[in-house]
Amino acid sequence: MSLVLTLYTRAGCHLCETMLEELQPFVEKYTLEVQLVDIDSDDELLRRYAIKIPVLALEGETLCQYQLDAEVLGQALKANSAA
């Protein structure tokens, strides 16, 4: 079973593009699926995240926002891979 990372984003967000690029080594190392969610397509997501994007979540739990925290992501992936 692969883990699902959710990246909350919007079109034209350079921070979102950067985080997606920075995720690639993790995608290659672990069995991951990255699900991109455009917050502009959902009113509730737009209210929740508005200017907080990008937001990265693993299995529904927020790991980081604005910038990738590689240490936090690595620890979460290791913990979820061991489970």
Image: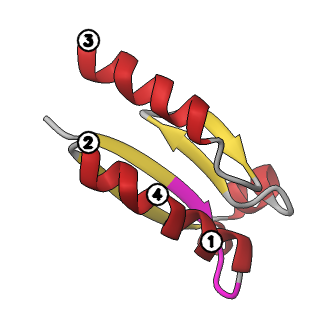
Q: Which circle's residue, 4 or 2, is located before the other in the chain?
A: 4
Q: Are marks 1 and 3 in contact (CB under 8 Å)?
A: no
- What is the magenta range? 7-12
Rounded to the nearest angstrom, the CA distance separating label 4 from label 1 is 9 Å
Report if the CB atoms under discs 3 and 4 are less than 8 Å apart.
no
Q: How far apart are the alpha carbons under marks 3 and 4?
A: 21 Å
The amino acid on which the numbered mark 2 sits, given as a three-letter code, is Tyr
Disc 1 crowd rating (10 Å Cα; few below 14, some 14-19, many 20+) is some
Q: Which residue is mark 2?
A: 30
Q: How is the image coloured?
A: secondary structure
Residue 83's label in the rendered image is 3
Q: Are marks 3 and 2 in contact (CB under 8 Å)?
A: no
Q: Nearer the viewer, mark 3 or mark 2?
A: 2
Verify whether residue 8 appears in magenta.
yes
Q: Earlier in the sequence, mark 1 or mark 2?
A: 1
Where 14 sits versus 60, above or below? Answer: below
Return the residue at label 1.
Answer: 18
Quadrant into which the C terminus falls? top left
- Residue highlighted by disc 4: 23
Q: Secondary structure at mark 4?
A: helix
Distance (Cα) linking label 3 and label 2: 14 Å
Tell me which residue sits at (64%, 84%) in the image: 11
The residue lying at 42 percent from left, 33 percent from top is: 59
Q: Quadrant of the N terminus?
A: top left
Alpha carbon of mark 1 to alpha carbon of mark 2: how far? 19 Å
The kind of residue tagged 1 is: Thr
